[in-house]
Amino acid sequence: MNAPDATATGDRPLNLVVVAAGTSVPSSTRMLADQLT
């Protein structure tokens, strides 16, 4: 199975950051998500 995950990360890397940061700082994540949308 050829799945270029490393190259596909450029598609939406912020999505992962928001989810990861949400576990630690939900306030900052909410502000970031607001700006992204």
Image (spheres, grey):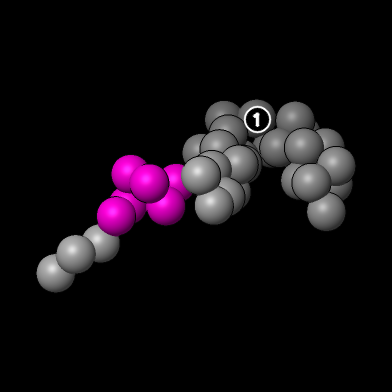
Q: Hey, which quadrant is residue 22 in on the image?
A: top right
Residue 18, given in percent of the width and then of the height, sits at: 61, 42
The quarter of the rendered structure image containing the C terminus is bottom right
Residue 37 shown left or right of residue 7 in the figure: right
How crowded pointer 1 is (Cα within 10 Å; few <14, some 14-19, many 20+) is rated as few
Please tell me which residue is depicted at 33% across the width and 44% down the height of the picture. Answer: 6
The x, y position of residue 8, in whole percent, is: 42, 52
30 or 4: nearer the viewer: 4
Say left or right for 27 vs 1.
right
Residue 3 to residue 36: above or below: below
* Count of all numbered marks drawn on residues in the image: 1
Q: State the predominant SS element of the stretch in magenta.
A: helix
Q: Position of residue 10 (x, y in %)?
A: 51, 44
SS at circle 1: loop
Q: Which residue is mark 1?
A: 25
Name which residue lies at 79% across and 46% down: 36
Task: Give above or below for 9 relative to 28.
Answer: below
Task: Name the residue furthest bottom.
Answer: 1
**Res. 11 visible in picture:** yes
Query: Looking at the image, is 16 positioned above or below residue 25?
Result: below
Near-viewer residue (30 or 37): 37
Res. 30 in view = no
Quarter in which the N terminus is drawn: bottom left
Please tell me in which quadrant of the rendered image residue 28 appears: top right
Q: Residue at x 60, y 42 (%)?
A: 14
Mark 1 residue type: Val
Residues rendered magenta in the picture? 4-9
Residue closest to the far left: 1
- Picture quadrant where residue 4 is located: bottom left
Image spot of residue 2 (x, y percent): 19, 64
With 37 as the anchor, is 13 left or right in this view?
A: left
User: What's the residue at 25%, 62% (across, down)?
Assistant: 3
